[in-house]
Image: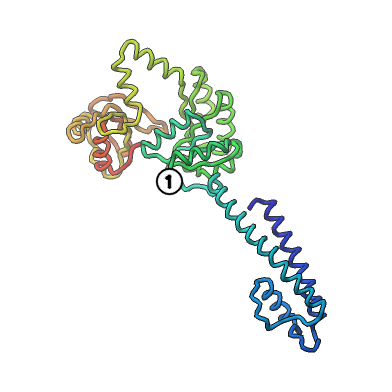
């Protein structure tokens, strides 16, 4: 129940207990010592009250005086109100619990997941792609009507939804934001996104943030503000359009590669980390290239290494480069190749 409802219920209970306490005291004064009365002690009076309220009616304790019976009538008729109060509050409590769960106030235990701040059609397409790639997503929205839509489209074990004002940073703990792999700021305009990045980093400084920009000239501004990745939607669209005009086959392949492969025959680019007992550790890049092609029909064309706390991308590096524990390999593969690599590497794709 909400705060005001709880206070109201507590006040009602205290009033009822006070009234019953007064009536029990009067009943005991009226009945105690009267010939034939079986209500002579406080315990007898309490027992008679419980018998009457629960409608059990054993008949072993009954008032014999006129006013004592009048108090008994009050006990009898008030039992309907007590039952109504109890049933009503239980129903209200269960409804509130269900509502709080739907609104996400119970929190989630997702980890290494994506958090999306803001919900719209673009956010929905991003969520669908992430879900297809096997990633869990937590969505924060201040549009209550969108919550039912999200629950309808996505299972709860893949998408968690929180109804919250975006600037309520304490409530973001409900989406387990500290353990998120990345936070996607999906607000309406670039100015709103920039202000939000600055404010949220005051509370969660070490997280990775990504935004999509309408104005590509603001990339450096967002980077300086602490945004990990700033993507210009117009820039990507223009490059893809130009490619369709001059190199349509390249454009078709490029669009396929940046999308998730839903079928085994479809191709896309994936990133796997090398760690543990991976057989590629200590192997020259050139040998890894041929081994992956031969064993899994996978084409290796890039490597990422963390150097001095920064991720450095090696695009088709020198063949003598030796693969190290902790490196990331960027590869082109189909669905079958993905499953083979998961078995060999014993790890899922992604950073």
Q: Which residue is mark 1?
A: 157
Q: How many marks?
A: 1
Report the residue at 76% width, 80% height from top: 63
Instruction: Report the front residue among 329 and 317.
Output: 329
Q: Quadrant of the C terminus?
A: top left
Q: Secondary structure at mark 1?
A: loop
Residue at image coords 37%, 12%? 242
Q: Nearer the viewer, residue 17 or 303?
A: 17
Q: Position of residue 347 (x, y in %)?
A: 31, 42
Vertical placement of residue 93 versus 180, above or below: below
**Residue sitting at x 38%, y 14%:** 241
Q: Quadrant of residue 27?
A: bottom right
Q: Is residue 75 above or below residue 58?
A: above
- Across and down, in percent, residue 131 comes to 40, 37
> Is 5 on the left-hand or right-hand side of 31?
left
Q: Position of residue 129 (x, y in %)?
A: 39, 33
Measured as percent of width and height from the top left, residue 309 is found at 42, 34
The answer to whether residue 6 is above or below residue 218 is below
Q: Residue furthest top?
A: 246
Q: Which of 17 and 165 lies nearest the eye of the viewer? A: 17
Circle 1 Cα neighbour tier, 10 Å, few/some/many (<14 / 14–19 / ≥20)? few
Q: Left or right? Give the position of 25 relative to 340.
A: right
Above or below — where is 305 with respect to 88? above
């Amino acid at each position: 129940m909400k705060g005001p409802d709880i206070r109201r219920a507590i006040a009602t209970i205290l009033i009822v207990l006070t009234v019953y306490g007064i009536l029990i005291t009067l009943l005991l004064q009226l009945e105690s010592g009267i010939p034939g009365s079986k209500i002579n002690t406080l315990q007898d009076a309490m027992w008679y009250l419980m018998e009457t309220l629960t409608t059990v009616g054993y008949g072993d304790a009954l008032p014999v005086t006129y006013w004592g019976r009048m108090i008994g009538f009050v006990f009898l008729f008030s039992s309907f109100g007590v039952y109504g109060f109890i049933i009503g509050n239980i129903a209200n409590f269960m409804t509130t619990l269900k509502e709080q769960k739907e609104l996400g106030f119970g929190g989630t235990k997702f980890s290494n997941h994506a958090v999306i701040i803001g919900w719209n059609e673009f956010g929905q397409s991003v969520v669908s792609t992430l879900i297809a790639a096997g990633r869990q997503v937590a969505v924060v929205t201040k549009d209550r009507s969108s919550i039912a839509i999200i629950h309808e489209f996505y299972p709860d074990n893949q998408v968690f939804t929180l109804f919250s004002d975006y600037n309520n940073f304490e409530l973001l703990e409900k989406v387990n934001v500290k353990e998120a792999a990345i936070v996607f700021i999906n607000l309406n305009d670039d100015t709103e996104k920039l202000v939000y990045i600055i404010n949220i980093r005051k509370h969660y400084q070490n997280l990775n943030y990504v935004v999509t920009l309408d104005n590509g000239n603001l990339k450096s501004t967002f980077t300086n503000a602490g945004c990990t990745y700033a993507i210009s939607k117009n820039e990507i669209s223009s490059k893809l359009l130009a490619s369709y005009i001059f190199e349509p086959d390249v454009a078709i392949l490029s669009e396929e590669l940046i999308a998730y492969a839903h079928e085994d025959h479809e191709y896309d680019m994936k990133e796997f980390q090398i760690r543990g007992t991976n057989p590629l550790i200590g192997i020259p890049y050139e040998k890894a290239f041929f081994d992956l092609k031969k064993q899994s029909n996978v084409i290796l064309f890039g490597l990422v290494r963390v150097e001095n706390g920064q991720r450095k991308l090696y695009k088709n590096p020198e063949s003598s480069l030796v693969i190290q524990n902790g490196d990331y390999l960027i590869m082109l593969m189909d669905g079958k190749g993905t499953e083979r690599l998961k078995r060999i590497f014993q790890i899922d794709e992604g950073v």
